[in-house]
Image: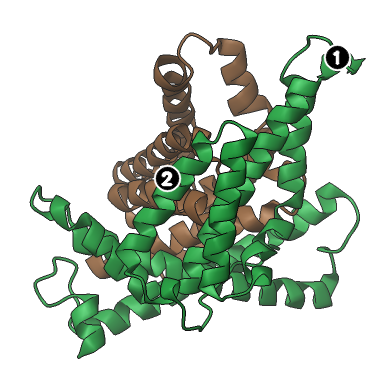
Chain colours: A brown, B green
Amino acid sequence: MRQVKRVVVAAACAALGIVLPMAFHALPGAGNVWLPMHIPVMICGLVAGPVAGAATGVLAPVLSSLLTGMPAAPILPSMTCELVAYGLVSGLLARFVRTGRLAADLYVSLVGAMIVGRLVGGALQALIFSQGAYSLAAWVSGYFVTGAPGIVLQLVVVVPIVAALERAGLVDARYPGKE
Amino acid sequence: MRSFGGYVWADSPLHRAPAAAKLAGLVAGAVLVLAVRGPITLAVVLVAIAALGTVSRVGWRCLIAPLWGMRWFLLVIVALNALLFSSEEPLFSLGPLHLTVPGIERGLWIAARTCLVVVLGAMLTATTTPQQVVDGVRDLLRPLARLGVPTETVALAVGVTAQFVPTLLRESQQLMRAQELRCGGFAARGIMRRAVSYVRLLVPVFVCAVRRADELSRAMEARGYRVDGQRGTTRERGRS
């Protein structure tokens, strides 16, 4: 992908990281449950690489917090670190994982990013942001139970979206000439 | 879907103020709002924001419109704090849920602070064009360029993001209306049915956003823009 396009795609994904939560907040409690900001960050990592993914992981929550008040400032640092991990890891895995099948590559990268991001988020909560007041139960509850619909949503929509972008010729094909 | 304040044409001191100062002011304002502890400081902050809103001449409807879209979010924040914050001297208990006065107070404080930050953000976007935001970010980040930080690229990304938000909101709303006409769903009762309607929207929204990004990047490259900044900046090209 061209460098200018990489930057603009990261910005477009960051904008979606602001717009999608605004849409989902029409549903009660949707932010923590459906995790709408995670989706564009991971997609950016998958299609534009780790640096663009990480940049989206910073831009989306920071600009969203400044422009819309969400996420609230007290949770902004931990959420930003977690999103950076999602974007960075999804981009790195997408770069190095080559199974020969698009869907398999994307699912490995996506699931890897989801696991690493949650581990990073939990570790940062335990060591820095909620030092001494964070437990394994709180981590499981916060990252897996409350956000279970969001996890399912990511598994259902991220790969088809990336495949649709490839089919539309809007991002580089992983396996050119292979349908 | 929540409306998002775009630029509002007007001639006011806030419109004429440098974008860098407004961005720094927004960050400082957000920090100040978070630091608010008592009713007197809250009143001072409220008066200051009201004065800024009046000076901006963009109209209060524009500044508080985003809050309506956040009503459920705010309600949930207040409810969660009211029921889960404390278990001492509950007004009402049901299993692990305890409705307490400190919980209600804490929830209302958080909701009030969030509302104030949202109004400040709406004030920035209503009085600052996306290009001015790019210039402001670049000006603020300029000292970091000496450390090797790609400030031009960061400014470009921030500016394009700010520019894309109202555009993508508009396009999402058009897609929602089109889907509503075809098969309904967004106005359907029931959280799950409405959620499924939003999910159906995701693929076209992403394709639309990346298509716009592709077109914009091609247009920028055609005008000689390079990310390394060697061929000129968006500000220089905008003035040429």
Instruction: Write down the residue under mark 1.
Output: B90
Mark 2 Cα within 10 Å, few/some/many (few <14, many 20+)? many
Q: Nearer the viewer, residue B151 or A113?
A: B151
Residue drawn at (74%, 54%) of the image? A26
Q: At label 2, which amino acid type do we have?
A: Asp
Residue A153 vertical placement versus B96 (above, below) = below
Badge 1 marks a residue whose secondary structure is loop
Question: Residues at badges 2 and 1 in contact (C-beta under 8 Å)?
Answer: no
Residue drawn at (68%, 53%) of the image? A24
Residue B227 vertical placement versus B98 (above, below) = below
Badge 2 marks a residue whose secondary structure is helix
Specify the quadrant that holds the N terminus of chain B. Answer: bottom right
Question: Which chain is indicated by disc 1?
Answer: B
Whole-percent x, y for residue B34 in the image: 51, 38
Q: Nearer the viewer, residue B32 or B201?
A: B32
Mark 1 Cα within 10 Å, few/some/many (few <14, many 20+)? some
Whole-percent x, y for residue A22 in the image: 63, 56
Report the side of A159 relative to B221 (left or right).
Answer: right
Q: Nearer the viewer, residue A178 or A131?
A: A131
Report the side of B200 relative to B126 (left or right).
Answer: right
Report the side of B33 relative to B149 (left or right).
Answer: right
Report the disc number at residue B150.
Answer: none
Residue A117 vertical placement versus A124 (above, below) = below
Q: Nearer the viewer, residue A48 or A60?
A: A60
Residue drawn at (34%, 42%) of the image? A88
Instruction: Write down the residue under mark 2.
Output: A105
Residue A129 vertical placement versus B38 (above, below) = above
